[in-house]
Amino acid sequence: CAPADALGDVGAIPPTGPDPADLREQFTEALDTVERAEAEAPEEIRADVAVLADGYEEFYNALEAADFDITHLSFEDLAVLDTAEMTAASERVDAYRADFCG
C-alpha cells in the first residue's frame, strides 16, 4: 500500500508559496515520491499509477521550464493534472487504497 499511499500524500502537498526555490525543492521531492510509487505499485493499480506519474512528470517539466515560477505557467501547463484520464486513474488508486490499505 505504500506506493498508493505515497501518491495520496503527493496530492496533499500544497505549494509552500510563490518562491521558486521553495517550489523547486517541494516539487522535486514530490516527483521522486511519484517515481518510487510507480516503480513499486502493485499490479492492480500499476497502469493507473503510471498515468499519474506521467501527468505529474509533465507538470514538473513545465514548472522546470518556467524556472519554478508559477506565474509563467500557461493554462495548458496547469490543466495537465486535470484531465479525464488523470481523474479516472486517481479515482481508481483512491478506491484501491480504500479497499486494501484501510
Image: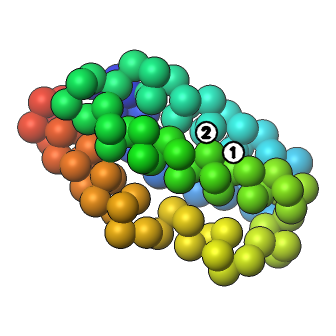
Q: Assess disc 2: are there few (<14), some (14-19) or many (≥20) residues with their C-alpha within 10 Å of its C-alpha.
A: many
Looking at the picture, tell me which residue is in the foreground, 39 or 21: 39
* Marking on residue 62: none
Quarter of the figure that contains the N terminus:
top left
* Horizontal relation, residue 14 to residue 7: left or right: right
Instruction: Look at mark 1 in the image and give the residue it sits on.
Output: 27
x and y percentages locating residue 24 in the rendered image: 80, 46
SS at mark 1?
helix
Quarter of the figure that contains the C terminus:
top left
Q: Amino acid at mark 2?
A: Ala
Residue 59 visible in this rendered orientation of the protein = yes
Numbered disc total: 2
Residue occupying image coordinates x 46% and y 69%: 82
Whole-angstrom CA distance, mark 1 to mark 2, is: 5 Å
* Marking on residue 30: 2
* Horizontal relation, residue 49 to residue 88: left or right: right
